[in-house]
């Protein structure tokens, strides 16, 4: 009988923040066609790859060299899809979220972050999930129609290279109506992909009205890659 594992929205591998796992929705039709999906986390540019529900054998065979006792083989069932970091969390990504550089081998932006413990990883994930991915909402007329929007609705990402305030500006629209912008500190990775002509899609993943009647909208950006 396989062990059931219900994956939470975000957790870490526990191995020096070696990977980020986040349960976010992706289109099943594209997965069924065999096209790999990568979600770009907008604040850091992390590439998250979808892991589908299913079963696998965890552990190592008894005859494996240097095998430890806790590595016994057993079946594990993933009860729902989640997304796993395609590569390690880099020092640059860690600093963007945490504002610190804990690595012993620092000064290498694309290198993996290390010398972090489980508690620091959990705080990293908490802050990452709390980052607001939509700026300028209050300066638009979106307050008059946001109740018509639904989780799962498609959003359009429109580059504004001539924007006088930010050459990397990305306008976010819903059915041709402006909602706001990807925040300036979070848009470089997405802007680079758009400028390269990458097929990016965006959709709403959370809608809520706060106690002060302000509206909080979260969205995700998905990149469909070729299967080559």
Image (tube, helix red, strand yellow):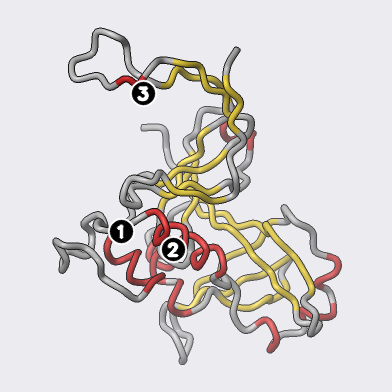
Label 2 Cα crowd, 10 Å radius (few <14 / some 14-19 / many 20+): many
Disc 3 secondary structure class:
helix
Q: CA distance from mark 2 to mark 3?
A: 28 Å
Q: CA distance from mark 2 to mark 1?
A: 10 Å
Where residue 52 appears, as percent x and y from the top left, is 55, 31
Q: Quadrant of residue 207?
A: bottom right
- Residue tagged by mark 3? 70
Q: Nearer the viewer, residue 72 or 109?
A: 72
The disc label shown at residue 116, or none? 1
- Please identify the quadrant where the C terminus is shown: top left
Disc 2 secondary structure class:
helix
Q: Nearer the viewer, mark 2 or mark 3?
A: 3
Q: Nearer the viewer, residue 142 or 89?
A: 89
Is the Cβ of the residue at disc 2 closer than 8 Å to that at disc 1? yes
Q: Earlier in the sequence, mark 1 or mark 3?
A: 3
Q: Outermost residue toward the bottom?
A: 164
Look at 48% across and 19% down and name the residue there.
56
Look at 41% across and 51% down and name the residue there.
47
Disc 1 secondary structure class:
loop
Where residue 197 appears, as percent x and y from the top left, is 42, 57
Relative to 15, say whether 130 is above or below.
below
Label 1 Cα crowd, 10 Å radius (few <14 / some 14-19 / many 20+): some
Look at 44% across and 48% down and name the residue there.
12
Q: Nearer the viewer, mark 1 or mark 3?
A: 3
Locate residue 173 relative to residue 194 in the image: left or right. right
């Amino acid at each position: 009988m396989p062990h059931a594992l219900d994956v939470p929205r975000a957790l870490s591998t526990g191995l020096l923040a070696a990977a980020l796992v986040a349960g976010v929705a992706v289109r099943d039709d594209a997965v069924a066609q065999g096209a790999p999906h990568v979600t770009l986390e907008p604040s850091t540019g992390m590439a998250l790859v979808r892991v589908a529900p299913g079963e696998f054998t965890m552990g190592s065979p008894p005859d494996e060299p240097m095998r430890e006792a806790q590595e016994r083989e057993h079946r594990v069932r993933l009860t729902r899809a989640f997304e796993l970091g395609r590569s390690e969390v880099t020092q640059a990504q860690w600093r963007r979220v945490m504002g610190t550089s804990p690595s012993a081998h620092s000064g290498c932006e694309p290198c993996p972050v290390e010398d972090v413990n489980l508690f620091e990883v959990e705080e990293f994930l908490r802050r990452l999930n709390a980052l607001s991915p939509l700026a300028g909402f209050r300066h638009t007329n979106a307050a008059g129609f946001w109740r018509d929007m639904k989780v799962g609705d498609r959003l359009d990402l429109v580059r504004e290279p001539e924007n006088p305030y930010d050459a990397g500006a990305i306008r976010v629209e819903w059915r041709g109506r402006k909602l706001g912008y990807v925040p300036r500190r979070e848009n470089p990775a997405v802007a680079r992909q758009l400028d390269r002509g990458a097929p990016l899609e965006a959709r709403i993943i959370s809608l809520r009205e706060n106690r002060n009647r302000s509206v909080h909208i979260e969205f995700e950006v998905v990149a469909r890659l070729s299967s080559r």
